[in-house]
Amino acid sequence: MNFKAAIFDLDGTLLASMQVWEKIDIAFLTKRGLPVPDNYVNEICARSFEEAAEYTIQLFNLSESVEDIVAEWNVMAAHEYAHNVGLMPFTYDYILKLKAAGIKIAAATGLPEKLYKPCLIQNGIYELFDFTCSVDDVHRGKQSSDIYIYAAKHLGVEAQHCIAFEDVLPAVQSAKRAGMITYGVYDQYSAHHEEQIRAIADGYLYSFEHAPLPTK
């Protein structure tokens, strides 16, 4: 497999964080006396925080502002990401192997920098990234290919020479549309889309233990 750069999603891909968001979503909605729809986490996980807040306001007919909801989510998540969110198995070793092979590394995430940066630092991998970015930087969620094109541009690598790792269907679709080699990564919250992800992606991983390395 020939690639010169690797672009990683964070939540549910590199970071074992999806249960944190389930806790936050339950707490947020329970505080307002609202039920948690079965597909709520899946519906918002590929959106930017602002898009997720807009979706939540429309879904529950809330009178709160997007800004207030995003601020509340950030407060609820800040401690967890700074102290309690760890790496998915084998991810650290895989990144080291890529770095040793001269591959450029980027994070392209739906998280704001105030959440992802302390988490990557706490896990000892922040300095391994050549570039990090959020959907906040392109003002569009991962239903769009913008973040992947943005990351590739800042790495100085053409999209077709990048490999992207994503755990949710809309993000896999967008990375593929960007022209990248695309790998789906198993996550319990998107397991119901595994067949669709496999049909689109160039490969599928249950862990990074057997993730692809570049062709010599």
Image (cartoon, grey):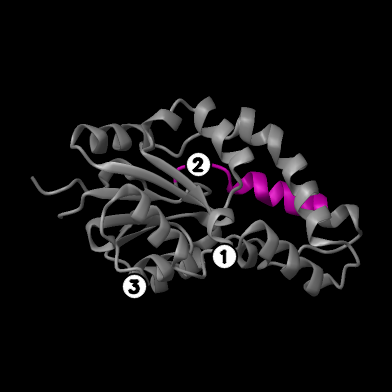
Disc 3: CA contacts within 10 A as few (<14), some (14-19) or many (>=20): some
Q: Position of residue 172 (x, y in %)?
A: 41, 65
The location of residue 175, given as percent across then percent down, is: 38, 65
**Residue 61 is one of the magenta-drawn residues:** no
- Whether residue 185 is visible here, answered yes or no, is no
Give SS at disc 1.
loop
**Which residue is disc 2 drawn over?**
15
Residue 27, magenta (yes or no) = yes
Q: Which residues are magenta?
A: 14-28
| Nearer to us: label 2 or label 1 | 1
Image quadrant holding the C terminus, namely top left
| Mark toward the start of the polypeptide (3 vs 2) | 2
Q: Amino acid at mark 3?
A: Ile
Q: From the image, give the main secondary structure of the stretch colored magenta.
A: helix
Residue depicted at 78% across the width and 48% down the height:
71
Q: CA distance from mark 1 to mark 3?
A: 22 Å
Any mark on residue 140, and which?
Answer: 1
- The residue type indicated by label 1 comes to Arg
Residue matched to label 3: 200
State the separation of the CA atoms marked 3 and 2.
23 Å
In this view, the residue in front, 20 or 151, is 151
Q: In the picture, residue 63 is in which quadrant?
A: bottom right
